[in-house]
Image (spheres, rainbow, N blue to C red):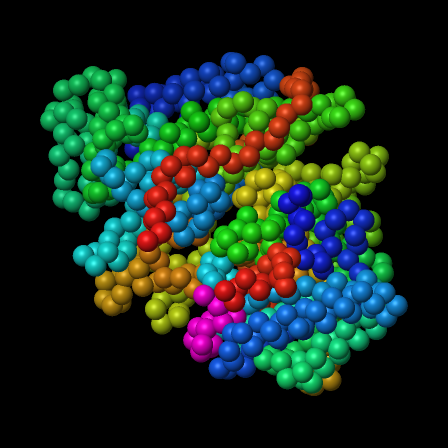
Amino acid sequence: MSADARLQPGIHHRSGDKPPPAYRAVLLDVPRGAAPQAVRDALGHLHMVSRKLARDSELHVGLSPLIAYGRRFFDDTVHDPPLTAASRPDHLAYLDPRHDPFPAIPWSRTPAGNRGEADVLIQLTAAHEASANCAVAELLAAVEQDELSLEAVTVFYGFGRPDGRGWLGFHDGVSNLESARRPAAIVSIGDPAWLAGGTTMALLRFAIDLRTWRGLTLTEQELLVGRNRATGAPLVGLDAEGVAVSRLPQDPELDRRAFVDPPETTDPVIARSHVHRANQSRASPGAPAALRIFRQGYDYLEISAHGSAVAGLNFVSFQGNLGTVVHLLHAPGWLGDVNFGGEPNEAASFITLSDGGLYAVPAENDPFPGACLFG
Amino acid sequence: MRLREPGLLYALGREGRAAWGARVEAIGGKAIAGRPSTQLSLADRLPHVVVTDWPGLPSRVVACAGRGCALELLDSTGRYGDEGRRRLQEDYLEWRTVRDEASAIVRVELTSELGAYWRTLAAHEPRALLETVAEFAREGGVPPQAIFGVADPLALAPDEREVSFARAMLDVGGSRSPYNSGSRAICCMVHESNTLSALVNLVAAASSRFTVTQADGKQRPAFMAGEVIALMGAGATAGRASDPVLVERLTRMAWDGRTIGVDDPVGIYLAGVEYHRLRTPNGELVPPEWWSFSRGVPAAPSADGRARPQRLVLEVPHGEGYVVGDLVDAATEQSIRYGGQIAELVQVAVYLRASEEGTVESQPYQAGDVRAAAPDCADVRAAMPEPEEPK
């Protein structure tokens, strides 16, 4: 059995399995005082509904439901009686509501307003917006009409662009791991044991200040990202005029590795760009300190209470251990001392965290992923 | 060879510095001599610095035992002092925890200092060494017998003094002085892999172009840590935080056609701390000044802007009303019960040197089919307590 055989659907990591463009995250809380058995029954029911929807290939095209458990699910101070006696994964923690969640990424609103922490998150990816929306409607209807021991908290929306670019105008996900290496980065070895064969998920909704970003020159943007905006080719240095120089592959097949993983740079300016900071050693997941994760992000657009458009990224990452993404966002020299890329204390800051949470994603199991948490 | 002291310290006199340079040269020369395919060079002045870093908590031990059990094992003590350190703190960072009567941690001391440098200090600057040990132990003075194994180390010749010091302070297989066993102090690293020889050997071995044979019989470059470590034969351990990332970085640079060197001053450095994770019992951020770096220059006055401290102490100032054991890691929501929780926040780094791309064309190391090395957990499992029999 391959290492990733028991991963839930919705993690589009295999070769040829491009993440479909529609994304929803349905966040659900357990009402206070709910009996664990009632919650177990509720989740089993929702699982059955979501898998039934996924089999409807006419409307719910490419629908992949995934169930995840948040820090709150394990919180005995919230749930009396406790929902589970299972151990919480060590790095499955709340994002600090009192302080900025990461050293270089502040909250975008008052942290008390974080909507990203919930007991349960059901991720839905689908080929069409309608497929995802109808699935959300069916799930929320089941919660309400069947009087399940669950309460809807919010639904996050996301989309993938057909041109493969993100709000910054650059190709997104170019540096993602090669598909053959992804299972080693994604699959949990089982610490705690109930998570074996599953994974963990970080959902971080980064709001992007596009006015600041678009105020930068093309060279400034490219140096922050570390790639050529038009081609996606990695930068290799600066010319005499200070213009960023990139290197397109001579032979696309042979040089693909160099394209995806930028070549070793000895230029200190290039080394401080986002792609180098986020992937300093370009080593495989076989090197734990390479901090490799599998990203499956989706952009979003919201209209604020004041009527202005808020553009952002649902940063979604899967990794065997949440400690990996925690290090990535805290370690100096990586993304712990700069908002996105560039020189600490000098580079432009344009990203804030609007909502977010960390989740455990148990392996496929009968009757549903995570059923074992209820004993 | 004239080399600077680790951390840009100035503890050695002229003879001592010459001895340090000779020691590094001998270790490097030996590592290179047996490897015709290596692209490591000690002679070239290479233009670029390449930083490779890793978190200080030993990832192999965590993967083998689970994080909770690993933290306990890493701090475990035995007949000869800090057994967990000697056996399992294997990622070029070692620590001791100082606890109060209630077993709460009051101080964590971490070091990346190399035993080889301390041997040189012992041979050539014994008085300064004694003062440093006393400072680390927070004692007015330390008995020379405990450090050098003899009451009057100055009566010995430098090479005899070095041997006597190593026997007393570095003996990894048996008893060690309380001044380097964690009971009164920790001075320099003692794990068998945390040595200058181990580091230079790894760099020499991994700075090569390895190939593996594909199913169609063609050779392809080997880049993945598991396969390169297997091809190296020895010198690196799969699953560690340090070795695999160094191996992949080095072999990739070798395939880029770079000559590779080790930056002078050679050493293992504590390049940074994830400060933002640690909270006081009141939920406030722990001030950076509670972390005390030493035994090397910080980034600011360093000519190249790179930090080179080799020692770090975390302690809550008197008067705050609580101790390190009351601090909380916000990323785990756990209070600090083990030194490994602090090691996890520390970025350990090696500064390598590299030429431009395409400046060297060494022969690939030809190899047949290879099974990628996987983390071996036997030693960790042997150190784990037996599961309790069901009653």
Q: Residue at x 30, y 44 (%)?
A: B76
- In the rendered structure, the answer to whether residue B322 lies left or right of residue A120 reads left
Q: Nearer the viewer, residue B345 or A92?
A: A92
In the image, what residue occupies the spot 53% across and 51% down?
Answer: A190
Question: Can you see residue B310?
Answer: no
Relative depth, front residue between B342 and B147: B342
In x, y percent, where is residue A191? 50, 52
Residue name at image x 71 percent, y 65 percent: A65
Q: Residue furthest right?
A: A58
Left or right of B169 on screen, residue B220: right
What is the x, y in percent for residue B220? 73, 26
Please determine whether, in this image, residue B201 is positioned above or below residue B50: above
- Who is closer to the viewer here, A10 or A221? A10
Work out which quarter of the rendered image holds the N terminus of chain B and state it: top left
Boundaries of the magenta span: A73-85
Residue A180: image quadrant is: top right
Dividing the picture into quadrants, the one containing residue B309 is: top left
Residue, far front: B391
- Left or right of B183, for residue B29: right
Please tell me whether the stretch drawn in magenta is mainly helix, strand or loop: loop
The residue sitting at 23% across, 62% down in the picture is: B318
A213 or B276, which lies in front?
Answer: B276
Q: Is residue B368 magenta?
A: no
Q: How many marks?
A: 0
Residue B164 visible in the shown view:
yes
In the rendered image, the vertical position of residue A243 relative to residue A300, given as above or below: above
Q: Is residue B116 above or below residue A292?
A: above
Counting from the top left corner in percent of width and height, residue B66 is at 45, 49
The percent position of residue A244, horizontal first and vertical second, equals 74, 47
